[in-house]
């Protein structure tokens, strides 16, 4: 008897189009910020680990608007840090 079936969706059956690098680089270019595909990949690894940590205590969907804003500010900061770009939360 099969009790459960799991699918590894992201990166196997589904992905971003345009890529996460393309999304980030288009916006960064408008602000004169240079990023690399490798850096963005590294940054997303850090940002996704941060998301897992934050969600383990209280899921984002249950947080206040200001808590969500603070979370996504830090998430994006971590994405850009992967390319060596250090931005201020302000």
Image (spheres, rainbow, N blue to C red):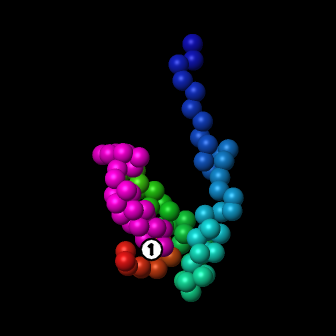
33 is within the stretch colored magenta: no
Tell me if 85 is positioned left or right of 88 in this view: right
- Residue 57 falls inside the magenta stretch: yes
Residue under the image location 34 percent in, 53 percent down: 64
Residue ID at (53%, 19%): 3
Residue 85 in the image: above or below residue 79: below
Which residue is situated farthest in the left direction here?
A: 57
Who's the residue at 46% across and 80% down the image? 85
- Residue 84, position in %: x, y? 46, 79
Residue 17's place in the image compared with 30, above or below, is above
Magenta highlight range: 56-81
Total marks placed: 1
Q: Is residue 71 visible?
A: no
Q: Which residue is mark 1?
A: 81
User: Which x, y percent locates residue 5?
Assistant: 58, 27
* Quarter containing the N terminus: top right
- Residue 74 seen in the current view: yes
**The image quarter in which residue 58 lies:** top left
Quadrant of image for the C terminus:
bottom left
Say whether residue 54 is left or right of residue 15.
Answer: left
Q: Main secondary structure of the magenta part?
A: helix
Does 31 appear above or below 53? Answer: below
Locate residue 20, reporting x and y percent. 61, 64
Q: Residues within 10 Å of mark 1 (few under 14, many from 20)?
A: many
Q: Residue furthest front?
A: 65
Residue drawn at x 60%, y 48% is: 10
* Nearer to us in this view, 68 or 24: 68
Q: Secondary structure at mark 1?
A: helix
């Amino acid at each position: 008897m099969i009790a459960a079936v799991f699918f590894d969706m992201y990166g196997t059956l589904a992905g971003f189009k345009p890529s996460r690098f393309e999304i980030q680089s288009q916006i960064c270019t408008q602000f004169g910020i240079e990023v690399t595909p490798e850096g963005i990949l590294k940054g997303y690894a850090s940002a996704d680990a941060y998301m897992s940590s934050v969600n383990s205590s209280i899921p984002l969907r249950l947080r206040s608007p200001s808590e969500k804003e603070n979370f996504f500010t830090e998430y994006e900061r971590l994405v850009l840090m992967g390319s060596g770009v250090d931005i201020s939360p302000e």
